[in-house]
Image (spheres, rainbow, N blue to C red):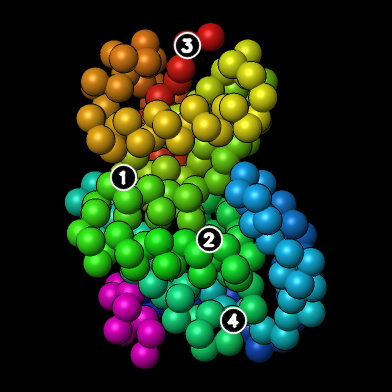
Amino acid sequence: MAIRDFATGFSIDHTYSQDKPDPRMSRSFGVSWDRVHPNARSSADEDAVENHQSVLYVLGPPMTTETAMVVSTGALMLVHQVIKAGAIAVKGESAGVAHGLARWNELILQASAALKSDDDFALRRVCRLAFAKRPLASDDYLESVGFHLTGLPEVFVPKSHGSEREAVATMDAVADEIARQGLEATLKSRRAKLSFESDYAEGDFKFNPYGIVKLAS
């Protein structure tokens, strides 16, 4: 019912969904909890994952530039419905990010407000915060993954720019600038480059077809 009413094109993955605990879930959520938002999870959320009794996987439809926001918004509304139906923990698999139930509900309320006010910029930002993961560390950069889920390129910030928290603030600011003023203007103002060299193969959940904005050192 929820898929039909709120998330057209989504479907249940019957291959991996199961009516019994999955011992991999604690580790899977453990590496996926959002590390940016204060109090993004609680001990109750961790206990819920540890003591879960079943697992439901939901597959989303393919995304294009034109449909990315529709699909991501549908995914967030579907999260709302499964929580109402009794889900005790939720993780976005595409970028590998999990939030506690209170944080999911906060994001859902923000998305609902953006929809009511027809604020596309705010809705894109909320969906990005809901489904993208940041920061991930490589040798030289602190990186985002999953910005393609809202039709945006990834943003890589050199480690020399400062702390992880400062890098995340820069990632979010650059993503907001791209959403507001466009990619070319942002590349110019930030003296950044667009790269299509990715650690993920095309077709991988984490592959970003819009490329990577790399800020200068």
Element on which disc 4 rests: loop
Are the residues at dot 2 and dot 4 in contact (C-beta closer than 8 Å)? no
Q: Where is residue 60 in the image (x, y as percent from the top left)?
A: 39, 66
Residue neighbourhood size for the residue with mark 1, other residues' Cα within 10 Å, grouped as few (<14), some (14–19), many (≥20): many
Q: Where is residue 122 in the image (x, y as percent from the top left)?
A: 32, 50
**Left or right: 22 as drawn, with respect to 167:** right
**Left or right: 109 as drawn, with respect to 163:** left
Quadrant of the image for the N terminus? bottom left
Q: Tell whether position 79 is magenta.
A: no
- Residue 151's label in the rendered image is 1
Element on which disc 3 rests: loop
Residue at figure coordinates x 38%, y 35% from the top left: 175
Q: Which amino acid does label 2 sit on?
A: Gly
Q: What residue type is labelled 3?
A: Ala
Residue neighbourhood size for the residue with mark 4, other residues' Cα within 10 Å, grouped as few (<14), some (14–19), many (≥20): some
Are the residues at dot 3 and dot 1 in contact (C-beta closer than 8 Å)? no
Element on which disc 2 rests: strand
Query: Quick check: can you spot residue 101?
Result: yes
- Residue 189's label in the rendered image is none
Q: How far apart are marks 3 and 4 (CA)?
A: 43 Å
Range of magenta residues: 1-9
| Among numbered discs 2 and 1, the one appearing first in the sequence | 2
Please tell me in which quadrant of the rendered image residue 50 appears: bottom right
Q: Mark 4 points at which residue?
A: 87
Instruction: Classify 175 as above or below 197.
Output: below
Q: Position of residue 132 (x, y in %)?
A: 49, 48
Q: Where is residue 168 in the image (x, y as percent from the top left)?
A: 55, 33
* Nearer to me, 112 or 139: 112
